[in-house]
Image (spheres, grey):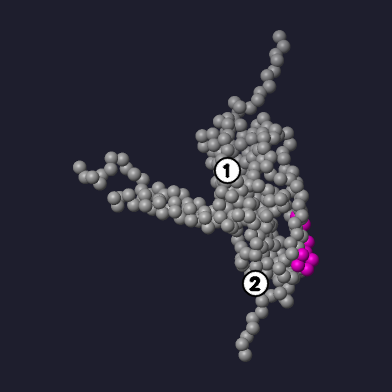
Amino acid sequence: MNEKTDLTTRKENIVARRPDMPRVAPVVDIYENDNEILLQADMPGVTKEQVLINVDNGKLEISGMRKLQTKGTSTWQEFGDVEYRRVFSVPQSIDVGKVNAELKEGVLKLHLPKTEAAKPRTIQISTL
Amino acid sequence: MWTRIGDIDRMFDTMDMLRSRLNRVFTEYEGPYGEDYGWQVFNGSPRTNLYDSGDSFQIIAEVAGLTKEDLNIRIQGNYLELSGKRRPDAPEGYKVHRVERDMTSFTRSFTLPAEVNADKIEAVLQNGLLTLVLPKAEAAKPKQISIS
């Protein structure tokens, strides 16, 4: 038996992810009514192509990259290129197939509809 | 031994990460962005950047959720005033779980490093960023001096 042969295969190409941009959590508002949960997040400077929304196993992850288009040398700088990222726990009663998102003026609006089973129902009292 | 080259790579990557984080320590010291807690409101007014490209200044401000009508830009000489009001966009008939986004009006003023040509200022609002291009006044523009 060759001593170079490993019993288990190792993934040699996994390298620790190197964040070259600071990662910040965007500010959010969360609302809920009988039909859906509504999430609004401020992501100024993020374009539609750079937004990633992932719902998986009770976790909702939103992330977006911002690359500023600048010219000239900086006199003062209070913000820069950034990766917005935030993870939320969402109830299992979310209808993942019907989640819809819109990005307007740097605000991400995410509608998370509830499944039919999770919606409240009124029960009619039948008169005999 | 050399089949473990990935481990060495990983070690160097971690060292690189540490170095880049240390490089940012001083620039982030006064900045509102930290590693994980970067979402504080900056005194209720939008954050801005100013760039100087010789002939003009460029100002970028973070104004997420504001429309053209909500913003007001005034200029007098080299004094620039940026004001606006963020209208509440809370939907009707919803129960509130969390409100972090600020809904206030703000005014922020700047003294630009040089006089600008007030007639040629361009303002663009896109993806929640306001970009102003302010061409400098003739007197403030850099001049080429030829050697005789």
Residue, disc 2: B54
* Quarter of the figure with the C terminus of chain A: top right
In the image, what residue type sits under mark 1?
A: Arg
In this rendering, does residue B126 appear at all?
A: no
Up/down of B143 relative to A93, above or below: below
Tell me which secondary structure the magenta stretch mostly adopts. Answer: strand
Badges 2 and 1, same chain: no
In this rendering, does residue B93 appear at all?
A: yes
Residue B47, given in percent of the width and then of the height, sits at: 68, 55
Residue stretch in magenta: B71-79
Residue B39, given in percent of the width and then of the height, sits at: 63, 47
| Residue located at (44% from left, 53% from top) | B15
Tell me the quarter of the picture where residue A90 sits. top right
Is disc 2 in contact with disc 1, using a CB cutoff of under 8 Å?
Answer: no
Chain to which mark 2 belongs: B
In the image, what residue type sits under mark 2?
A: Gly
Identify the mark at residue A86; answer none if there is no mark. 1
